[in-house]
Amino acid sequence: MKKRNIVRIVSMALAVSMIAAMTAGCGQSSDSKAGTGNEGEAAAGGEASYKDTITIAHWEEPTTLDPQAQGKMSCGAVSTQIYDTLVTLDENGQPLPCLAESWEQIDDTTFRFYLREGVKFHNGDTLTAEDVRYTIERACTNPGSSSTFITFDPENTKAIDDLTVEIKLKSPDASIYDTLNGQRGAIVCKRAIEEMGEDAFGHAPVGTGPYKLEEWVTGTELHLTANEDYWGEAPKTPNLVYKIITESANRVIEMETGNADICLNVLASEVPRLQEAEGISVEMGPGYQYTTITFNMQDPVLSDVRLRQALAYAIDREAIVDAVYGDTATVADSIMPTTILGAKTYDPNMYDVEAAKQLIAEAGYGDGLTLNFVVQPLEEMQRLTEAVQNMWKQIGVETNVSTAEVAAYLAQGNTLQVGIRNGSASDPASTLIIYDSAFGDRLNSNNAELDKMLADAKGIYDTEKRAEAYYDICDYLWEQKWTIPLAFKNTIYAVSDKVEGFEFDRMNYLKMEDIQVLE
């Protein structure tokens, strides 16, 4: 008889304890994971036997494993095994020890971190404060991370001694711990980069993490082995294999045939099939991922708030989410995911075609208009675009749709007239970065009022006051419709029932050192 497959909806109330994070290595941010493993299930039959390799079906080949050069989650999913950060975060976004045993805030722009003694890089070098200072410096200058570190002051960040580093900021920044916890803040080995060069380092990384890269077979798979000199607890499984499988259906087949133990970044369309599969559980819970329509705010047509509001009223977001995501996403009821500090919620049921027609007539486009819509060539994006096209047609708006691969899409930056983007970040400052002129201004807004609101909110260290500041920003953006948030997407994994020690992570950045797979 076929075993009924269970979809586990992960409760956000669950989190690892602070003690575990302090004593067992860095672990992952406990605000982003919850235990859902099968620990102890094998005990009834005697001593369990485990595989020496965990096989992970990965959705995309990393472009680099240099943390400061990363621009995609597919990179971080692997590099999180290879590197450590100064701190991790608890369920409330408060810092926990990792490579830094302790720290103190000297003033609004000065933070001093005290490092663990005796931590080794994969090449045998000992971690020092100079490696941390160097990491901050390159994070501030590398195009892949510089916008994230824009408030950091590399010139005045210094190594005080071998185990003490003082990080300076140009202006107060309450997101400092979130930034240092992110993969772009992962600590690299200065000597390794200087000797091999940055390009080579991206394919032969040297970190302090629980695993090290053994082999990278381009286009096929990456092999990682346990770091025997890891400063925390040794990984429970000695080998990891990341299989690069870009076709979603093929990743599912790997799970069904037992050739993969864990599948990352499962698409909503594959969930029903996985629910029917023998020996597989679907692990799903709220994440930080959002999907939103973006507008070029300097475009002569879209600069009129009435037109943007009309376009928003014309979209039946509930119908779109049901059709594209089913139960794997919720209708966006805020500017940013409600898992994030400062996300104020609103009534998302604003579908009103008649109101949309009235507004578009007031804006002077009662006879219709045509917008240029650029999207990435992904199944999800194509389905979303088709739905939006059909809804906008009801109010006389036609769309010329073109596609662009990720790199080309991002390269167009704020020249896009209309686009759809996916985003993911755990801090409000990072999530709202697309609205900020200081960070590249992806929406071409050039709005001094909003820039000041964003800068002020980022500099508030009191959590409650900071949340209130972001509520005000949400009010402004929800009313002005600079974007039309569509969906907040769950993070979804497929996990073999033989897996023990699985910990849900909202970002697809699973930490693998505590996972085992039964033979």
Image (tube, rainbow, N blue to C red):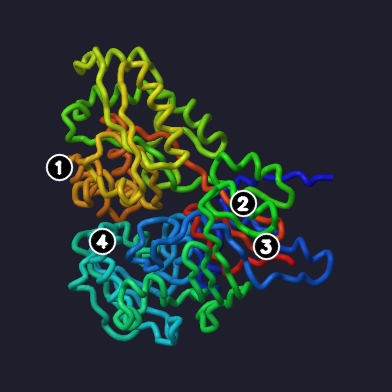
Which comes sooner in the sequence, label 1 or label 3?
Answer: 1
Question: For the residue marked with disc 3, what is the amino acid?
Answer: Glu
Which residue carries the number 2 mark?
494
Q: Please tell me the numbered disc located at residue 500.
A: 3
Instruction: Select label 1 or label 4 by which is in front.
Output: 4
Tell me if I can see residue 205 in this picture: yes
Question: For the residue marked with disc 1, what is the amino acid?
Answer: Ala
Which comes sooner in the sequence, label 2 or label 1?
Answer: 1
Q: Residue at x 28, y 67 (%)?
A: 139
Residue 56 at x, y percent in the picture: 58, 61
Q: Please tell me the numbered disc located at residue 79.
A: none
Instruction: Select label 3 or label 2 by which is in front.
Output: 2
Which residue carries the number 4 mark?
143
Crowd around label 1: few <14 · some 14–19 · many ≥20 (10 Å): few
Instruction: Select label 1 or label 3 by which is in front.
Output: 3
Q: Whole-Å distance between the Cαs marked 1 and 3?
A: 51 Å
Q: Are marks 1 and 4 in contact (CB under 8 Å)?
A: no
Q: Are marks 1 and 3 in contact (CB under 8 Å)?
A: no
Which residue carries the number 1 mark?
448
Q: Whole-Å distance between the Cαs marked 1 and 4?
A: 24 Å
Crowd around label 4: few <14 · some 14–19 · many ≥20 (10 Å): some
Q: Whole-Å distance between the Cαs marked 4 and 2?
A: 34 Å
Taking 237 as reference, is 423 above or below it? above
Q: Whole-Å distance between the Cαs marked 3 and 2?
A: 13 Å
Q: Secondary structure at mark 2?
A: strand
Taking 237 as reference, is 125 above or below it? below
Residue 98 at x, y percent in the picture: 44, 72
Q: Secondary structure at mark 4?
A: loop
Residue 158 at x, y percent in the picture: 24, 77
